[in-house]
Amino acid sequence: MPLMFRPEDRHRVANGEITVTYRLWARSHVKAGNRYETGFGTVEVEDVLVIPAGMIPESDVPLTGCESVDAIRALAAEHKRATLAPDTLLHRVQFRFLNSASD
């Protein structure tokens, strides 16, 4: 299964500016140590944690490319058009970009 990113974030993922993403999944779709295609290259997942939406640390804001913790929550909910409560569980995926699709 690929790990998808919004078109406007792809360049920043490829440049290493975005290294963490939050996903609203019922179960994890990725595993630490595995590599996943993105449609524009390959990422290696370094860590996967499940945490409540209300516990997203401020220190993750710059790693996600978002402007705030609220923006992280909104992005995580966007795909499923969901509303997150503070206790909604999110998957925090830390990754590193390995190479572009053209390499």
Image (spheres, helix red, strand yellow):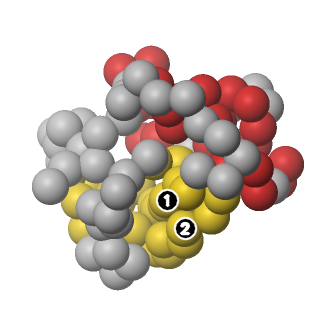
Horizontally, is 55 left or right of 64 in the view?
Answer: right
Please tell me which residue is depicted at 36% across the width and 30% down the height of the picture.
80
Above or below: residue 86 compared with residue 28: above
Horizontal side, residue 74 vs residue 41: left or right: right
Give the vertical position of 42 relative to 13 (above or below): below
Displayed quadrant of residue 75: top right
Which residue appears at 48% of the width and 71% of the height? 48
The outermost residue toward the top is: 8
Q: CA distance from mark 1 to mark 2?
A: 5 Å
Report which quarter residue 8 is drawn in. top left
Please provide percent x and percent y for residue 90. 53, 54
Relative to 18, is 28 on the left or the right? left
Residue found farthest to the bottom? 33
At 84% from the left and 48% from the top, the residue drawn is: 58
For label 2, count other residues whose C-alpha is less than 10 Å away and answer few (under 14), some (14-19) or many (20+): some
The residue carrying mark 1 is 91
Disc 1 residue crowd, few under 14, some 14–19, many 20+, Cα 10 Å: many
Q: Which residue is mark 2?
A: 50
Helix, strand or loop at label 1? It is strand
Dot 2 falls on a residue whose secondary structure is strand
Q: Is residue 41 left or right of residue 60?
A: left
Q: Are marks 1 and 2 in contact (CB under 8 Å)?
A: yes
Inspect the image, locate mark 2, and give the three-letter code of the amino acid beneath it: Val
* Kind of residue at disc 1: His
**Residue 15 seen by the camera:** no
Q: Is residue 40 visible?
A: yes
Q: Nearer the viewer, residue 29 or 83?
A: 83
Of callouts 1 and 2, which one flags the residue occurring earlier in the amino acid sequence?
2
Image quarter of the N terminus? bottom left
Nearer to me, 2 or 10 = 2
Residue 63 position, x and y percent, is 67, 48
Residue 92 image position (x, y, % from top left): 55, 59
